[in-house]
Every structure is written in C-alpha cells, then in structure tokens.
Image: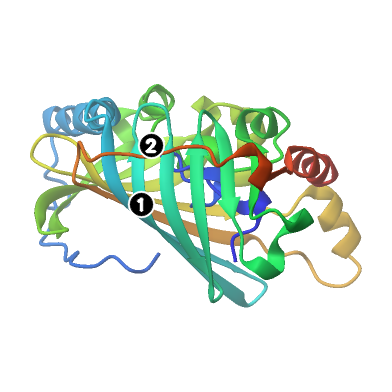
Amino acid sequence: MVRPDGSIRVGTATVAGVLAGTVLAGCGTVGGSPAGKETSSTREQDTKAVRSAYGKTAEQDTARVTLRVQTSADGTSMTASGRGTVDLRDGDSVMTLSAQGGRVEQRVVDQVLYQKLPRSEVPGGKPWIRIDLQKAAERRAVGGQSVNDPVQAAAFARAIDGKDVTREGTSEVGEVNTTHYRVAVDVAELPDGATLRRQLGPTLPMDVWLDGDGRIRRQQIDMTLKAPAEDAATDRASSPPRPAKVRTVMEFSDFGTDVEAKAPPPRQVTDLTGTALERGQTQN
C-alpha cells in the first residue's frame, strides 16, 4: 500500500511523493524531426511551447488525472497507480491509490494530505491519517514534490532551456492528438535544487505530450535516486548501493471537472506529521 511518507501531492502527485509507468496506453510515436533538420527557429518554438504548457494547463483550473509510479531498486520493483481529480492551481485533489494489492482513499486539502487506510493499518482506531505537506516539505520529510508537481509551473519553466528540448513526434493520449517533447530539466534551477542535484544529478529526463491548445496531456519523469553518502559508506564493505529508479507518469483529461476535496471530520483523523518529520530527519 502507499505509506504516509511515500505519497505524492498530486496536482503534484502526491501528491506526496507518491502519488506519484509503463502503461503508456495508446501512445505510438509517429515520428520526430529528422536528425540534423531541426532549425534554431523550430527549437525556439518548441521550447516556448513546453515552457508555457504549465501555465496553460493550470489555467484550466481542474482536471481528471491518472497516475502510475514504477519504482525499481536492488532487483525488486513496485508499481503504484492512482485515479481521481485535481485542482491544478492549488494542488487540492481526491484520489484512489492502488499498490501491492491495497487500495487507499486520498485527499489533499490546503496542503494537508489525508489517507484512509485499510482497517488493518489504521493507527489509534481512526480511519484517516493526516500529514501537513508544507511542514514535511520544509524539513524534506516528504520527497519528490517539487519534481513531480505540475502545479510548480514557474519552477519548471525556469529550469527548461532551449538546448534541452527536442520534438519527438506526434501520438495519441486518451484519443487526443498530441505533440511529444523530450526535455532535460536543469535540476539546479528547481526548488531546493542543490539538494536535488545531489540526489538526482545535474539533469532530470522528462517527456511531455501537449495537445493542440498547448496543455499537458501526459508528463513522464524518470528519476535515478542516488544512495545517501552515509549508506554508501556503510555498504562499502559488502556491495556498493544501487540507485533507485522511479518513473512517474501523469495523464490529464476532462479539464474543468468538479473537484470535491474536503477534509474528513477531525474526530476520524490521526495526525502523523510528527512521525513524518522524525522519519525525514533520520533520512537526511
């Protein structure tokens, strides 16, 4: 199941780090610009299209979203998926997440993550847990938000340079014709870029598929997370730690749909923000 410290803020994806696959349904690349034929003018247009896509998508206010996160490390892999609705401006969302045979109802309201856990996982007998994402992010207890968050439009726009954008061709995403772009994001230009650079390296591979109105229909981010230095030192005597690979794919549709993101009644909620912060301290 999706653990409280592994969720991703969707809208961000979670939506706590989770929320945020190989399920690229209906995506067949028809063809890109022939090698060596891309002009500086074309590249400039492509860069402008990608940099403006985050703002154009957020202007739609809301959307239906599907999410798939594939993680592999040390020879094992796990896939998590999600489906729901998201406010593209403030990140509020209502999602159903599935992973390892479990299902979790999740809401993000005013930067607070709520998850309704399976009965066997409920702490203190209350069905919902709560994590303040803003506090957790400030202490880096919940990772991946700035990287996986389509709401962080300005940050991504600043981190995309003309030399890093390549048009790959056209394909269908959810029966919508799109143009596929491959992007190398400058990690140093993202929020908390210095820390992310140590974890991810200098660039972050990303693919986006834009519709005829310049809106994001699919975003794929491929991260290779390096093992912390202290882990490397600990494991040096045995075998070197292997990096973890994470692929996050988000698809957007039904722009303008209703988003009913409401916090559960307080009496049904256990606050685990402190637990997330403590875990974050041990991991930093």
Where is residue 121 drawn, in percent x and y? 70, 65
Q: Is residue 276 above or below residue 153?
A: below
Judge whether 236 appears above or below 153 on screen: below
Locate residue 159, reporting x and y percent: 42, 28
Image x and y of residue 256, in percent: 20, 36
Name the residue beneath numbered marker 2: 150
Q: Residue at x 10, y 62 (%)?
A: 30
- Image check: 134 left or right of 270? left
221 vs 31: above or below: above
Residue 163 position within the rendered picture, expressed as x and y whole percent measured from the top left = 31, 33
**Residue for point 12% across, 33% down:** 42
Q: CA distance from mark 2 to mark 1?
A: 15 Å
Residue at the spot of label 1:
84
State the residue in front, 224 or 282: 282
Q: Quadrant of the C terminus?
A: top right
- Write the residue at 29% across / 30% down: 54
The type of residue carrying mark 1 is Gly
